[in-house]
Image: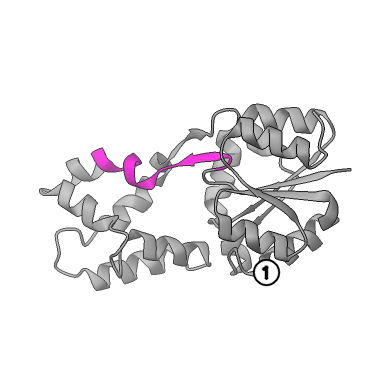
Amino acid sequence: MPNVIFDFCDVLLQWDPKGGTYDLFADGFPDGVKVWRDFYDEDADFGFWHYDGLLDAGLDEGEAAQDYRAHHRGEEGEGAFDLYLEHRDLAFRGMIPGMDTLLETLHTRGVALWGLTNFTDDAVKYVQSKYPAMRLLNDVVVSSVERVKKPDRRIYEIAIKRFGVDPARTVFIDDKPWNVDGARESGLRSFVFVNAMDARSQLAKAGIRF
């Protein structure tokens, strides 16, 4: 049986924590637009992306919020991370167009479907409860649970062992080239995700027929 392992964000899911919270921040702080801009600044040493990476690596969300407050004590946006955590469902904007249909088609054709994501366990459970097609995945390896993230080779090896798949007969799909490279180094066949149509074409080239 052929196997396909999917990344989550920007492959299966539209996840936009920045755009999803713009109105929330604008209404929640006197100078909300500035707080929002500073919070999501990719160059900030202790901004959203720093803590998002730590959460994906297994840091407890309460510890993350506490550390954020400590580094922003006395600033208007001291509670910005708490506000995000209270409303993080706003970051989920639906599935990537066409990917629910692709999952359903592969499942119907007997292809075994799996997930491998740099994400938090509660986020994975949330999207599986919200989007029926996500429940077609037989199992998911989650970085926050394993405390190791792609492209570290160890997480691919964990997935291969847990899913019981033959890497030579398994395709991994991710939107980030470095994660694809990590998968290939682990023996998995892999390609960079562009869109659902291209994914169908790439899977067909890998010998997975629809």
Is residue 86 among what the camera can see?
yes
Q: Which of 133 and 210 is in front in this view?
A: 210
Residue 90 x %, y %: 39, 40
Q: In the image as oriented, which residue stretches furthest toward the left?
A: 30
Say whether residue 102 is left or right of residue 37.
right
- Depth check: give the residue in front, 119 or 3: 3
Q: Residue at x 24, y 38 (%)?
A: 23
Q: Where is residue 46 in the image (x, y as percent from the top left)?
A: 30, 68
Q: In this view, does 130 lie above or below 186?
A: above
For image coordinates 65% across by 63% down, the residue present is 182
Res 130 quadrant in image: top right
| Quarter that holds the C terminus | top right
User: Magenta region: which residues?
Assistant: 11-23
- Report the amino acid beneath label 1: Arg
- Color theme of the render: one colour
Asked if 84 appears above or below 53 in the picture, the reply is: above
Please tell me how crowded label 1 is: few (under 14), some (14-19), or many (20+) other residues with Cα within 10 Å: some
Q: Is residue 138 magenta?
A: no
Secondary element type, mark 1: helix
Residue 17 sits inside the magenta stretch: yes
Quarter-of-image position of residue 67: bottom left
Identify the residue at horizontal 56%, vertical 40% (top origin).
Answer: 194
Q: Pick the quarter of the image with the N terminus.
A: top right
Residue 22 x, y percent position in the rendering: 26, 41
Give x and y (percent) for residue 18: 33, 46
Q: Give the residue at x 69% y 60%.
A: 183
* Quarter of image, res 87: top left
Residue farthest toward the right in the current orientation of the protein:
1
**Count of picture labels:** 1
- Badge 1 is on which residue? 153
